[in-house]
Image (tube, rainbow, N blue to C red):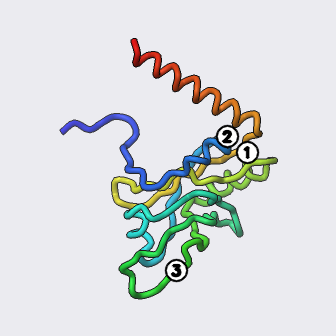
Amino acid sequence: MAKKQGKPEYVTAISNRKARFEYEILDTIVAGIELLGSEVKSVRLGKASLNESYAMIHRGEVWLENMQITPYEHNTLDTLDPKRSRRLLLHKSEILRLQSKISEKGLTLIPLKAFFNPKGILKIELGLARGKKLYDKRETVKNRDAERQLQQLKKQY
């Protein structure tokens, strides 16, 4: 069986669709995430959300804040806070590089999507982002509408 060239296919479990509208993504990086108990089972079932979540660097570690993971319903041992802080796993050099970029004015770390790699390990794609102004958002909507109309015209002919 021939192996495909290029990027490996990942099954996206969760995506933060609002992030690309609200922010201009300058750079992306993939990080592992430290989970406890049955949180992985909840994510596999799709009971997680990246809306309103962000990442921050604190004492040389990257932490993911406000990621909602609904507790697994068949869990009998312990109940975890659904919006607790979760540590992201990155190399020290990557953390230092991100920290130097974040110190620039107006940049932040936003999770774009969570996916399982081919080995079945949950990964988070972080985006180094700058917030869009209102007129940039209007421009995005206008371009999206124009592209949609163009596609409709192509379907007619």
Amino acid type assigned to the residue bearing label 3 in the image: Leu
Residue 89: x percent and y percent?
54, 63
Q: Which is more toward the observer, 34 or 67?
A: 67
Q: Which residue is mark 2?
A: 24
Label 3: element kind: loop
In this rendering, would 67 be left or right of 47? right
Q: Which residue is mark 3?
A: 80
Check if mark 1's residue and mark 2's residue have beta carbons within 8 Å: yes
> Looking at the image, which residue sits at the far front?
156
> Looking at the image, which residue sits at the far bottom?
77
Q: Quadrant of the C terminus?
A: top left
Q: Which is more toward the observer, 37 or 49?
A: 49
Label 2: element kind: strand
Residue 2: x percent and y percent?
22, 36
The residue that appears at 48% across and 55% down in the rendered structure is 114
The residue that appears at 56% across and 58% down in the rendered structure is 50
Is residue 10 depicted above or below 68 in this figure? above
Q: Quadrant of the N terminus?
A: top left
> Looking at the image, which residue sits at the far left?
1
The label shown at residue 50 is none
Residue 52: x percent and y percent?
63, 58
Total residue callouts: 3
- When asked about the image quadrant of residue 76, the answer is bottom left
Q: CA distance from mark 3 to mark 2?
A: 33 Å
Q: CA distance from mark 1 to mark 2?
A: 6 Å
Q: Mark 3: few, some, or many residues within 10 Å (few <14, many ≥20)?
A: some
Is residue 86 depicted above or below 95 in this figure? below
The label shown at residue 131 is 1
Label 1: element kind: strand
Amino acid type assigned to the residue bearing label 1 in the image: Gly
Q: CA distance from mark 3 to mark 1?
A: 32 Å
Residue 125: x percent and y percent?
53, 51
